[in-house]
Amino acid sequence: MPETIDPRNSRVPAVRDAAQVRDTILLCSLGLERQLKGLSTANKNRVLLALHAQIGEQLDSLAANNDQ
């Protein structure tokens, strides 16, 4: 039987945030895996390098916002 969460519990926001992060990672991973499946190795490399660059930009932006 699933356990119900009392919304007045102070841990509820943290549990919801963790679930949202987990679900986002899972969906992104599944989508990426599905899209890469049909690509050649060279095109997979291009896509992954572009994603790597985009992630780097996002991390730099977050770091800049944290410094303010």
Image (cartoon, helix red, strand yellow):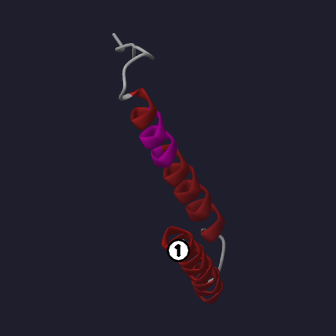
Left or right: 38, with 11 as reference point = right
**Quick one: which residue is furthest to the bottom in this view?**
42
Magenta residues span: 16-22
- The answer to which of 9 and 28 lies nearer the viewer is 9
Please tell me whether residue 19 belongs to the stretch shown in magenta.
Answer: yes
Q: Quadrant of residue 68?
A: bottom right
The spot of residue 62 in percent (x, y) is 54, 70
Give the x, y percent position of residue 66: 50, 68
Taking 1 as reference, is 22 above or below it? Answer: below
Pick the residue in front: 5 or 31.
Answer: 5
Q: Is residue 65 above or below residue 53?
A: above
Main secondary structure of the magenta stretch: helix
Quadrant holding the N terminus: top left
Answer above or below: position of 56 versus 1. below
In this rendered view, identify the residue nearer to me: 57 or 10. 10
Residue found at the far front of this picture: 68
Q: Residues within 10 Å of mark 1 (few under 14, many from 20)?
A: few
In the drawing, does residue 6 fall left or right of residue 61?
A: left
Q: Which residue is mark 1?
A: 59
- Name the residue located 41 percent from the left edge and 27 percent from the top edge: 12
The residue drawn where x is 47% and y is 34% is 16
- What x and y, as percent, mark residue 14? 40, 37
Q: Amino acid at mark 1?
A: Leu
